[in-house]
Every structure is written in structure tokens, then in C-alpha cells.
Amino acid sequence: MGMGTESEVAVPLPRYRLQSNLRPVMWLAIAAAGIAVVSLVRIWTGADNLDSSGAIQAAITAAVPIALAGLSGLWSERAGVVNIGIEGMMILGTFGAGYAGYQWGPWAGVFFGVVCGLLGGLLHALVTVTVGVDHIISGVAINILAPGLALYLSRLVFTDAPGGGQRQSPPVADVGRITLPLISDWLGEIEAKGWFFVSDLAGIVRGFCTNLSLLSVLAAVLIALSGWVLWRTRLGLRLRSVGEAPYAAESLGVNVYWYKYIAVMISGGLAGLAGAFLVVGLKFQDGQTGGRGFIGLAAMIFGNWRPGGMAMGAGLFGYTDGVQQYDSSGSAMHAFLILVAITLIVVAILQYRAGHPVVAAVAAVIAALCLWWFSATDELPQQLVKAAPYAITLLVMALASQNLRMPKADGLIYRKGGS
Amino acid sequence: MTGSRGRRILLGAAAPVGALVFSLLITSLLLIATGHSPFEAFGAMASAFERVRVILGTINQTAVFYLSAVAVAIGFKMNLFNIGVDGQYRLAAMMSAVVAGAAFMDSLPSFLRIAITLLVAMVVGASWAGVAALLKVTRGVSEVISTIMLNAIATFLIAYLLTPQMLAVLEGNNISTPKITEGGQLPVFQFEGSTTPLYSGVFLAVIVGVIYALVLSRTVFGFSLKATGMSETAAIASGISVKKMIVSAMLLSGAVAGLVGMPELLNGSAASYSLNFPTGIGFTGIAIALLGRNHPVGMIFSALLWAALDSSANALQGVGVPRELVTIMQGVIVLSVVVAYEFVRRYRLVLEARDVARALAARNPQEATL
Amino acid sequence: MSSDAKPPDLVMPPPEDVPMAVQLTGITKRFPGVVANSDINIAVRRGTVHALVGENGAGKSTLMKTLYGMHQPEEGTIRVDGAEVSFNSPAQAIAVGIGMVHQHFMLADNLTVWENIVLGSEPTSGGRLDVRQARARIDELGRRYGLMVDSGALVEVLGVGARQRVEILKVLYRGAKILILDEPTAVLVPQEVDELFGNLRELKAEGLTIIFISHKLDEVRSIADDITVIRRGTTVGTADPRSVTNRQLAEMMVGSALPVPELRESTVTERVVLQLAGVSVAGSVVGGRDVLSDIGLAIHAGEVLGIAGVEGNGQAELVDAIMGIRPIAGGSIELAGKDIGHLSTSARRESGVGFIPEDRQRQGLILEGSLWENRILGHQTRRPSARGFLLDRAAAKADTQRIVETFDVRTPGIEVTAASLSGGNQQKLIVGREMSEDPVLLIASHPTRGVDVGAQAAIWEHLRMARAVGLAVLLISADLEELIGMSDRLTVILRGRLTGAYDPRTVTTEQLGAAMTGAGDEHVGEVA
């Protein structure tokens, strides 16, 4: 069973679809409204790091690996293969990047990281597509195997390397970073003024054009490219059809196995890239992935299996992760509670109008709890903030489950000639 | 009568044995590729068991792993992936440790203290699993994702609660829950030549295993559980409430998961919960349940194998091989055993179809059905 | 089974110089343990509708999969337009002009109509999908053949008839000249069937050849130009639709004189066992009506009430409502005077309701379970299968043995899996199980569908015997002869309502058929 072949019998899902085809103008308006709200909260609470350029940079750095992991999951699941093993493939990527990175430079590290992740994807594909084992079991097995393999090799290879150790590699140089010269400074001045809306906007934009890693740019390009390939090209249509109705595709002469393999290997490569991102500019360390593979899956679900939505989810989760580390005062995360509450109130209103009063009530109650928590404390305990991405994902799945549409044949064990 | 009983057992054992052999092969290749001798490595691992301490430790670990595997297996029987055993057992261990070490427990008789501790552990484990169950039956949320999320949340929740301001105490440099005093723990069995005793928690595992086996094969509930796992539509038509089954299965799975930490808590020398408490047992349980095919006896063997591998890992250091070799072995075993099971399953279907057709044709030559 | 009946006068198609569109000669296809097709010979003329009829399990679908390239035959040749061909995949069959419209639609709900149609043969321009060209071509095909559908819509919003049009467009888009339609009318309501046949006639007029697989003999005779009959994996002959009768066709399909379903003397008593009043089941159906409205009926002990109807008019929902699988929105259901409308399925079964479900493999059995485990299924709260909360395995096994013997279930033993039994034996097991423990009411939904003739006769006999000792039966079937022969009273379900009350001794299949399609008298009310 697992994720794909869900029990429709236990819970008859209501047929409701969120209007996801809003015109671009609407998106701009929503974004502007969002910034305005954030700005108000910032001014009221005095939490400057809520959207300062430094915080945004930290958020981006935290979001990229999550986004790449989410993209990895997206490619695989769009072809109908559940990939729980993203975490393991990321770990393989970190090892590959560490191994090649300290010897031959960061881009060699990136390349090797991708290759190692891709090999993990190949294994997953072999076991799930060719043999026909349950996807989740294969993913769990890879998550057991990969860290062991990485640490085993690390002890052998890195221990005697200069600057390395049993569980870590020597340092790996960073890839190039971009800072738009004049604009960055100019925006910095505006940001420092602390004006409503304008300063926030300046801060956010500055965060995107200061010290931006080339890998972050690459990630953004890959996300956009994925959307284009999957929805506008022949390969993409066939790949998606394999995840929606593989037997239909088979009957039309599409080689289902082939497209599943492509998808899962791309998935592995992206996971490897995510791992490489963590290593570049730092080093390989045992345990550095920290569950990001699973947060990536969460981002994918949050984004309804679409690259744009997934990126937003990754951005959100990266924000909570990055800002919490960056902002030593803790005021930003505290103020974040208000933003969560406001969002939940909006969700409650939307759900009520869509005819789901119970869900709306639950959302409203949680919003009230968030507000109460904000007022009752000065600061959020650090450990609980770390749980934010997971709690948010649970919340989204619980409150918005009827809008979520995973590929119909996700998790289905496909056999050629079956049906 | 499709194939003799002997043939069935043989086929059933073929996969795990084959997987073990394959795993040995792969790890041998890895060892050779990285400049070690397989004989030396495996020899060192085997020699670890010359010490009584290691044997007893292995048995203790087997019990713990077995409990985890049973918890996972209950879910598997219903086609549910309770990946959340990991979070459930840790949260349950911590909360029951807090209760067990609380001041008011001192005045209670020993058996009551133990009973309360076990009860708290099962309730906490069941409740944490219950969250995922609730989300599944009311909102259709996949238990795979929700339990993964709950695992992470449990980790951070424990980190938050395990501070001196909350539920923990500071003793020297260690932060842990209050120690369980004399009378709150279960007895252990000391053996000569071993600093490690045999945990009485092993009997807990045996009891749970027996109950699991009996419930599954002899009770109406067990029948309904298996039926729902095999065909949801048939279960509904037969009057089984699928939602109730999902919730029951998850709650039971969580309750057993809660017991996973009990041998360590009630027998171990730490007598408290700290961040040193064993982690990752939930995932081990998944592997063991897979290896043992959710079978009450099969899982004993796979738990034993796993624990033995773990125990022998330390000995590898002596021959210069990283102990992660064992982890690699375990990962390869899991992968190869599920692959092998798939092949065996297909082969069995073909055999059975052929057998039945043959048997029927033999009886009624003109009645051979299409 | 020996072949006694002589096939009716064979009317061979007149010899022509134009090669056959499709000619299958000596086709044989084997699977492990089973010969699915053996020595098949079919000749399909160009520009005709050629019907392929046969019982369930006769091998029709397997044969068509061979023709469509989904697998290869062990022996025999395939000729298309006179040239010998051999297919390794559907792509090759498509290239030669063969297109298959499957019985179970092969559509991706989350993709649009045009995406579904062009998949595998997508038009591209500069690396991108050429959406405009695709949609233009599809719309043009739709206009030409009268298959109207919105090419930009998501398939999931389409109704059944529209989905079928998409399936047909799929094959036409690829330039199919020979269409294979596998049981196309199984899921259509009568109005949609007429539309489909109109489309088929237009396609024929354009010179396309159509191979039409069906077991609905009335439809076959109305649309086909030629008929080939398959029985037990081999072709047994051809027939002329203009002169052959349903009965002759059925006898060719079965190979012997058909058993006649019939009741003997009346055993109807005064005691009402099942009573429905004003029952309605909510749910949206095309047209905005409820799935079931204002259903009222009463069945007495010793009586069989038959409900006739085209699939999709609410029979399945009625059965679900009585069994408690589906909640009712209004009305009452009483069993022997006791209101059971709020009871769970389990409680209703315990009150003495037996259930032979429509889909035995999904609802009636656990295929991977043993026969004795399947005996327990549905009865796991009572003796002999259980005592309290413990299972009584020995008693269950013993009772399974009894059922196997009494109901003549052909099996090597009771430990084999249910999957290894044939359809007829599976059904006999289910009937035996549901009639154990002396139920007072039996819901029999298509009890002999897909079952070989021997098992069919046996099941009818057991129903007769149980009825004689007071069992009340609700019989739902698509087999009009079965309904007429086995019922004490008949009614028809149409668009969620029960219409008409018919006496099986006097009603004709034509009358019933008309009522089922709504052409007859619409009399709405309680069938008491």
C-alpha cells in the first residue's frame, strides 16, 4: 500500500479542487499583500530579522537543499515511483562531493555528488521497476545502506587526508557567489531605513542578490526547467502518463519501464546535487543531511507535486530552518507565529466558503492557539522551532488533503503486460 | 496440498538464506576492494561470540528488536506502514521514565510500579500512533508521511522536554529523567564471566510474541486484521469496519512500540531516559519484520541475526575494518531479501496454478478448466 | 462437455477478390497451465462490423490482445489486408492500422483529453508539444465522425459515454482502419448505446472495419454484419445476424442445450421478510438526480423477487444500501419487522442476511486466502467459524469440507488458495457459504455471471431448494432468462426507481427489455 494506492474506501475524499490556475496578476497582488502583512508584523514586534536581507540569505541557503530534495521526489513520483530513499541518496551525494571536492575543486565535487546520487537512484529503479518490490521498502533499505556505506568509506578515505578525520572530509572550497555590486548596496541603505513595505521589499530583494551561490541559481534554473520539461515536452507528457495511468501508456506503445528509469535516475541525481550543496564551501560530515530528504518530500506534498508549489514549500521550510539559526535574538521566529496565525485564519475563511466548516473551525482553533502562544511567551524554544517544517506539513496535509492530488498511479507496482 | 509442507518451508526459507549469502558476497567484494581480507573480517566478527558478555548482550538486543518488529508487523498485516515506531518508542520511553522516576512511585509496591510504567509506555506509544491513525481515517492522510513527520516532531519534543527546566534533572554532566529507585526496575540475571546480565525484559518480548501469534491465528480480531490487509473490498462486504481496523491496528502497533524501550529502561543500569538511550530501533524493526515476513517465529530469527551482526561490529575495529561494514551488510540483506521474496512469490503462484490444473485434470479428464 | 447441438445453417460470407481486412488462421496461445486460444480461425471483411461472441472466459480478450500485439501467439498467422504480419508490441499493430478500444478504459484522469489522445504519437514543434495542432486534429476527427468531445477538458470530469468517445478518438487519431471494441456497451445506458451504434455506422460508412466483442446477443444482432462464435478458446462457427436467434447463438457459445432456469411450484408465504419503504440514497448522477429515490418493496419468505435493469441504474447501490455498505438518505429497511437501517453490515449479516456479491473476486473472496479462511469471511462473528472472540478453525475447516461436497466445488482440497479455483467453483463456494447458517434473506447479485453452465445449473438448484424451505431472495441479474425463470415476481429498476410489476409466467423478454430501457410503461410506486 503505502502512499500511492491509497484506500479510497476508508475515507471517501470529497471532490474539490483548489483553483490553481490564477493569472499572474493575481499572484503579484497576493505577493504584495503578503509583504505588507509581514512588514506590519515586523514593525509591530520589532523583529527586524523577520525579513532582513541576512535572514533571507540564510533562508535561501537552507531552502536550496530542501528544494532540490523536493524536486528529486517530484520527478520520481510524477513517474509513479515513491522515493523515500531521497535522504540516503543525498548522503551518497555528500560523500561523492566530499571525496572529489577536496581533491579537485568544488565543481568536481558537485559532479561526483550528482553521479553518486544517480547511482543510488539506479539501485532504487532496479529494485522497484525491474524486480517490482514495494517502493517504500526499497527506499527504507537505501536509507539504511547509504549512511553505512558513506561512513565506511569515510573512515577509510578521509582519516589520513590532511584536514580530514574519521567522520569528515577535508574542507571543500566554495563555488562562486554572486553579488550585484551597486544594487546590493543601494538596497541595503533602503533596508536600513526601516520603512513600511519598501524596506521589507528592499531587504528581500537584497537577500536574493547578495552572496548568492551559483548552486542556488542552478537550483532555481532546474526547478523552472523541470516545470517546462514535464508539462511542455513529449518526454514530460510520457513521464507523467506513466505516473498517472501506466497501463494506458503501455497500450499506446510507451515504454513504461524506460520512463520510470529516467525519472528515478534524475531523481537520484537531484538528490545527489542536494547533498553536494551541503558539502560545497564546507566539508563532508557524517549526519549532515539531517532529515532534509524527508523535509523535501514534505515540500513536494505541500506544493501538490508541482515545481512552483514545491519551491514555495521549500522556501517556507528553509525560512524556518535558516532564520532560526541566523537570528540569535529569537524574536523573528517568535513573530513568525503571528504570520502562521494569519495564514491559518485565511485558510479557515477559504475552507469555510468552500463548504468545509469543520476544517475551517480546526484551522481557526489552531490559529488562536498560535496567537495565545505568542502572547504567553517571549521566545520560542529552539527545539520546537526545529519541528516547524514537520508540523506545518502535517497541518497542510490534514487541512488541505482534499486539494492535494498525487499522481494517480504513484506507488503502484507496475508489471508489463499486467493490468 | 499444493506442494508438500516441506516444500513450502523450503521455499519460505530460501529467500532469507539466499539474501544472507548474497550479502556476504557483496560485503566480501567491498572488503577486497578496500584492501581487507573477508576471512579476517568475518573471522573477527565470529570470534566476538567467544565472550559470554557478547552472547548475553545479543540476546537482550534480540528481545528489543523483536518487540520493534512485532509493532511494525501488526501494521504490515493491515497494509499499513508504521514508520513511526521510532518516534513512538522514544517518546514512550521518556514519558514512562519520567513517571517511573517520579517521587510518588517510591511508596508503591514493586509490581504496581512496573505495571504503571508499562502502562504509561503503551498508552503514550499508542497515542502517538493514534495521531497518524486519526489523520488517516478522517482526512485520508497517508500514514507513511504522517509517521515520518511525527518521528521528527517526537525527536524535537523529547529534546525540548529533556531539559532541567522541564522534565529532566542534572546529575553531574548528565541530563536525564530522574533515576528509577530501588524496586522500580525488573530483576536481571547475572551470569558468571559476564558483566552484562540477561535482561528479564526478554520474557516480555516472548510474552508479546506469543500474544501476537495467538491473536493473529486464533481470534476473530486477528482474522479481520489479516482480511482487511489482503482485500479491503472483501472486508467491507463481509461486515468488517475498515476504519475501526485501521485505528485498532495503529493503536496496537503504537502500544507494542511503546514497549520497545522497556527492557532497557527497566533492566538497564542507567535506570532513566537520556539522550544516550538507544535510537533508530524503529527502522531496525521494519527491516526485521520484512526479513521475517511478519511471522512470529520468523522474526525471532531475523532479530537474532540483526542483533548478532550488531554485537560483532565492535570486533571489526581490531582488524582495522570500519564497523559500518555491519550496517552495509544489514542494508544489503534487506534489499536482497525483498527481491528474493518477490521472485519466490511469483514462482509459487506459477507452481500452484500448475498444481491445481494438474490435480483437477487428473480427476476429471474432460473437465479440465480453462 | 460434449458438443451436441448442431450450429445453425452456416452462412459464409460470399467469396470476394478484396482481401480480408483481418484474417486469423490457426492461432494458438498458451499460458502456464492453461491453453487460452487454440486453432482460432476468423475472417473479417473490410468495411463491416464483425462481432465476436462467447462466454466469459472463452478466450475473446486474449485473442484480441494477440491481434493488438500485447503478446505473441505460439502458433498461427495473422494477415492484415492480405499481408502476413507479426507484432511484438502494440506500437507495431498501431502502425499497421489496428486500434483497440479496451473494455476498461485506459485513460489518465488527471490529464486532458488531448494529452490522453496524443500520448505516444505526440506532435512536436521545436522540442515542445504542439498543443494547437493536436487539438485541431482531434476536433477535426470529432467533427468528421460525429464524436463530439472537448479536447481541453480533464478526463476526470467526463462521463462514461464521453470517455468512450475519447477512447475511439485515440485509435482514430493514429489512423486506425481496423477498430477492435472490447465489450463497449458494458457500462453504457441505452441512450449511450444508441449513440455509440450511430457512431459505428458512420465509421463503417467511411470504410473502417470494426471487430466488436460482446456477449449481449441483442446488441450483437442489431449492429453486426457477421458473427463468429468462440467457445472454450476455439472458434466453433459463424452466424448470420439477420437470421440467427439468441438461443441458437447461446447454444453455439455453450455447446449443448442450455439448462432452463425455472421454479416449480409456488412456495411464497404470507410472512414478509424484507421491507423497504421510501428508501433513497444520495449521490450525484449525471442529470442531477439521486442514485436511488423512493424505493419500496417487500419480499416474503419462500419468494424470489427479481430486479431487472441495465447496469448503472442503481442496482448496485440498492444492494449496498440493504447490506449497510452505503448509508441511506431516507426511508426505512426492515428485516422480519425489525428496523435494520441503522445496523452495521456485520449486524445485518448476523441477523440472517446472506450476500452473494456482484464482484466475487473483489468483494466475495480473499483470493490469497485458503478456502477455509474464505469460509470464515463474512461469518467470523458466529458459529461455526467462531466462538466468542476466538476462531474455531477445526469447525470452520469441517464446514468448508461440507460445503465443498454439498455444492460440488471442484478443488483438490480446502487448503488451496481461492485464486486457484475457476470462476464457477469460486461462486459455488460463495453460494455455499452464504447459504450456511440458515439465512432468512439472501441478496444474490448477478449470482451466475461469468460462471460455467454446470455451476450455473447447480446454483439455481440450490436457490430453488432454499426457497422451498422459506428463504427470501432478492435476485439481481442482467440475464433476463435467469430472472424470468427464477423469480416469483419481477420488477424493473430504471434511473434509481423501481417501475412496474411483472408476472414472470406471462412477461416476455421483449417487454422487460423495453421497460429496462424506459420505452415501456413508467409506473412508479411500491412493489408489494
Image (cartoon, helix red, strand yellow):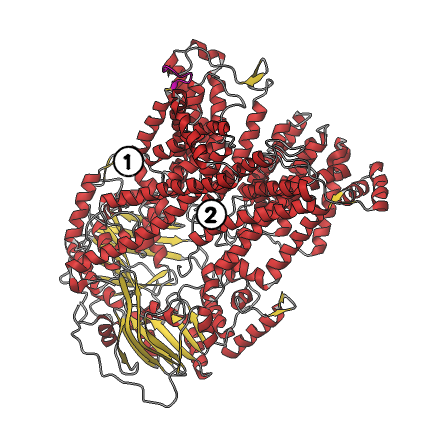
Could you tell me which chain the residue with mark 1 belongs to? B
Question: Residue C416 placed where, x, y %?
Answer: 24, 49
Q: CA distance from mark 2 to mark 1?
A: 31 Å
Of residues B331 and C303, the one drawn nearer to the viewer in this rendering: B331
Both on one chain, marks 2 and 1?
no
**Quadrant housing residue B50:** top left
Q: Which one is closest to the eye, mark 2 or mark 1?
A: 2
- Residue at label 1? B219
Work out whether residue A103 can be spotted.
yes
Quadrant of the snapshot with the C terminus of chain B:
bottom left
Secondary structure of the residue carrying tag 1 is loop
Is A166 placed above or below A125 here?
A: above
In this rendering, would C449 be left or right of A177? left
Is B46 placed above or below C39 here?
A: above
Of residues C181 and A360, the one drawn nearer to the viewer in this rendering: C181
Stretch in magenta: B190-198
Q: Is residue B319 magenta?
A: no
**Quadrant housing residue B305:** top left
Looking at the image, do the residues carrying marks 2 and 1 touch, with CB atoms under 8 Å apart?
no
Q: Residues within 10 Å of mark 2 (few under 14, many from 20)?
A: many
In this rendering, would B298 be left or right of B172? left
Count of picture labels:
2
Q: Residues within 10 Å of mark 1 (few under 14, many from 20)?
A: many
Question: Residue B282 placed where, x, y %?
Answer: 46, 33
Question: Residue C289 placed where, x, y %?
Answer: 44, 59
- Residue at label 2? A135
Of residues C397 and A106, the one drawn nearer to the viewer in this rendering: A106
Is A139 placed above or below C518 here?
A: above
Question: Residue B21 placed where, x, y %?
Answer: 38, 41
What amino acid type should be assigned to the residue bearing mark 2? His
Could you tell me which chain the residue with mark 2 belongs to? A
What amino acid type should be assigned to the residue bearing mark 1? Thr
